[in-house]
Image (spheres, rainbow, N blue to C red):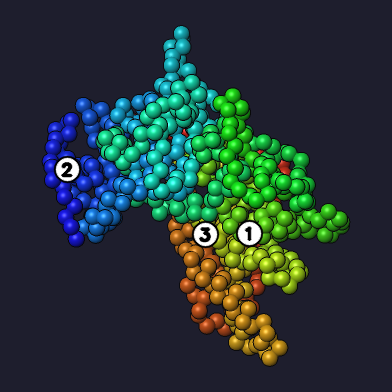
Amino acid sequence: MDEVGWDQVVPDFTGSLVLIGHRCGWLYPADCGPLSYELAVGVVARRVEGERWLSSTTLLTNQMELDKLSTQDLNSLFELGCFFILNDLPTGTQFTIDGSTWLTGSLFQGIKLIPPGFHIITISPAPIKPSRNKLGSEQTFNSPGIGYQVRKGLIRFFKPQEKLIRYFDSNLEDFKANHHSTEQTITSIDYMKTIDSKLAPYPIKDYDRWKALTSRITAEQVSRIIGFDNQEDGLLDSLILNNVSLSSHPPPPLSGSIPNRTQWGKPRLGNDQLQVQPLSQSQERTTFWPFIDLKRSWPKDAIGPELTKWSRDKSWLFDHLMHHQFNRDPEEVLGLLQLSFITFIEIQSIQSFEFYQSLMNLIVKSNLSELTELNKRRSDDQREKIDYLSLNLEITKVFSVQLKYLRSNFFSEWMEDFQIENWFFGVVDRFRMNLNYIISLTIKERFATAHKTENDVDDEERRQRRNGEVRRSLEGIDWPGIQTDCKRFDWNVKDLKIPISRLDDHLHPAQIQDLSIEDDDEEDEEEEDELSEDEEEEFKPVVVTTYPSQA
C-alpha cells in the first residue's frame, strides 16, 4: 500500500503541532495518538486565539486504523462525501447533525464528509441569560412546553458528492438558500479544501447508530408528511402545527377510493413521484401526519359484542389500515415509526410525538392472535396476506433501537410528565407479552411438525418457511439488552418465559402446554393498560430544553 504522505508539520494558531496531509488537505493534531478513521475524515476541535472553534459534546474514538485504508479509499472519503456549508451563523449557536451537538465558534462554517442519505440538521440560538427586572429579580421565559428556545430543523436526503451552501436568516432564525450569491456555485473540491479548516468532521463513529434509527424512512414519506421546498430541503421546527389535530379531529373516510390523493396526507400525483412543494417564507408551514382514530376502531356495521370487542382490541383497525392505508407494506409502518420518533427527538416536534404515540398505541393494543385470524379470513392470494408476527418483531427491533437512543435523563429532566414514562414502560411490557406469544407459537409449531400426519403435508413446506423467517427475526432481538437499557430509567422489566436463546431446546410437552397459560398479573396489566380516552388526552409531552455550556 502506498504511503499516505503526511509531509508537513506546522504550528496552529495556539502553537500546538498539527499534521497536514498534502493529498487531501486534512489537518490532524500531532499529539492525538495513532491515526484513526475518524481523524482521517476531518479536523478535531482545537482552540484558536483562546476561543474554541467547535466544542463537541462527543469525543472521537479509534475504530479503524488508517493503515487499513488504501490511498484510493482515503481520497474517496473526501471526494465522495457530502458537504454542508452554513454561513452567517451567530457564534454560540447550538448546532446538531444526526444527534451530535456543538456550540459554534466564530470560525465554524459547516460540516464535511457527510455520508449520503437521510440526515437531520438543527440549529437553536444561543440561550439568553435571564435578565433582571427593575426590582433585581431574574426574568424567566416560557413557551408551550419546550422551553424558550425553538429548534429549527433541516431534513434532507444527501446525494453522493453533494455540496450545499445555506445561510442563517437572522430575522426568521432559520435556514435559507441565497439564490443570488455567486458563492452558491463555487462548490468544487478545490474550494472545499480552501475552507477545510472551518469545517467540522461528520461524527462518523455514531453513523451506524443513526442508520439503525432511520433506515426505513423514505423520501416519499418525508415529502408527503413534511414537504420539500424547491431546494429539496424539508424544513420543520418545534412549533409547527399539524394540518389537523391528531387528538380531536373527526376521522377521515375509511374508503381508499378518493382519486388522486392519499386518504391521509398531501395530495400527490398518481404515480407517487416525489413532489417538491415550494413554500414562501410568508406561507405558514404545517405537517401532514395522518390522524388515527383509536376511538372508532370497529367495522362500520358492528353491533353488540362485536362492537365491544373491537372497541377494546384494535386488531380490526390495524388490519384495516394495513390493507387500505399502508398498502399492505410493513415498510411503510416501520418508516413512519422512525420518522415520527426521530423528528420528535431531534426537532422536538410535539406533532411528531402525538402521531408516534397514536401509531404505537394502535400496534400494541392489537392482539396478535386476532390479527393472525383476520389474516386467515382473507383470500388465498398470498399477496393479500400480511405476516403480522414478523412485522411485530421488526417493530420491536425498531423500538429497541429508539429506546437505546434515549438519554438516561430523558424522563427525569427532558420530559416533565411522568405519565409519558409510564406509557413507554407499558409499550416495553406489551412487546414482552407479544414475544412470549410468538415464542410459544414457534415452539408449538415445531412440536406439531414432529407429529404431523399425511393430511398436513401440503401445508408443511409453507409452515416451515414461515417458521424459519420468524425464528431468524427472533434471533435478532436482544431482550436482555433491552432489559439493561431499561435499567437506566429504573424500570424493572420481566424476563421472557422462554429465552430466545433456548428456542432449540427440547421441551417436555407439559412445558409447551404451560406456555399457553398467561400469568394472572399479565392479564391484570392488560386490563390496566386499557386507558380511558380522557387519560390518553392527558398524555401530552412537555419538553424542557437544556444546553451544553460553551468552553
**Foreground residue, 515 or 452?**
452
Disc on the earlier residue, 2 or 1: 2
Identified by mark 1, the residue type is Asp
> What residue is pinned by disc 3?
397
**Can residue 380 be seen in this snapshot?**
yes
Real-space CA distance between mark 3 and mark 1, rounded to the nearest whole angstrom: 17 Å
Identified by mark 2, the residue type is Leu
Q: Which residue is drawn at 59% across and 24% down?
A: 282
**Can residue 124 be seen in this snapshot?**
no
Q: Is residue 164 above or below residue 179?
A: below
**In this rendering, the label closer to the viewer, 3 or 2:** 2
Q: Residue at x 55, y 72 (%)?
A: 469
CA neighbours of label 2 inside 10 A, class few (<14), some (14 to 19), many (20+) = some
Identified by mark 3, the residue type is Lys
Along the horizontal axis of the image, is 124 left or right of 306?
left
Q: Residue 147, image x and y in percent?
A: 51, 29
> What residue is pinned by disc 2?
19
Q: Which mark is residue 260?
A: none
